[in-house]
Image: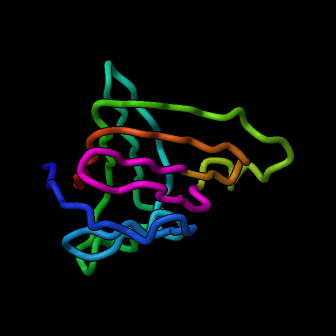
Amino acid sequence: MNNEVQLISPMLNTPLVEMETSLGAIDLHNYANFTGLSYSINKIVLEWTEHRTGYLLIGKLPVTKFFLVFSDIQNFDLSPFGNGFPESEKMNLEHFIVESFDLNLYKIIFYFGNGQHLNICAKSISSYFE
């Protein structure tokens, strides 16, 4: 069952590991595994799953999966993998930086444990969880 949750404007241009929502924050670095990205015409969905049962929370609510949905994509850039990173850390989210978060433009850069970064600029962002 999917439950939509509203995102709250975060601090801009600062490395973050928690995404603020209307139900509380969710830690996407310490308690979640980044499990994938799907792309369709003008839409990108990022997915995280719980690292350990019962530890991934939105506020105090336990969740098993969390999704960020970017729509009306303006720009999308995925850098190549870096070398020399431990296998267990390669797809972990190190942090993200929000450069813009307003009604007409959302720009977020995600940095992963393998040295890769994902830059998404879109006109709409939403989120949901299971």
The C terminus sits in image quarter: bottom left
Q: Main secondary structure of the magenta part?
A: strand
The extreme right residue here reads 84
**Residues drawn in magenta:** 93-109
The extreme top residue here reads 41
Q: Position of residue 52 (x, y in %)?
A: 45, 67
Q: Is residue 3 left or right of residue 41?
A: left
Q: Position of residue 84 (x, y in %)?
A: 86, 47
Picture residue at 19% right of the left edge, 71% below the top: 22
Nearest to the observer: residue 29 or residue 111: 111
Q: Position of residue 64 (x, y in %)?
A: 31, 59
Up-down: is 23 above or below 95? Answer: below
Nearest to the observer: residue 114 or residue 86: 114
Q: Is residue 28 left or right of residue 25?
A: right
Q: Is residue 100 left or right of residue 58?
A: right
Nearest to the observer: residue 61 or residue 97: 97
Picture residue at 59% right of the left edge, 33% below the top: 78
Q: Is residue 62 left or right of residue 55?
A: left
Residue 95 is one of the magenta-drawn residues: yes
The extreme bottom residue here reads 60
Q: Position of residue 72 (x, y in %)?
A: 29, 30
Picture residue at 61% right of the left edge, 60% below the top: 94
Picture residue at 52% right of the left edge, 68% below the top: 16
Q: Quadrant of residue 55?
A: bottom left
Q: How many marks?
A: 0
Residue 110 is one of the magenta-drawn residues: no
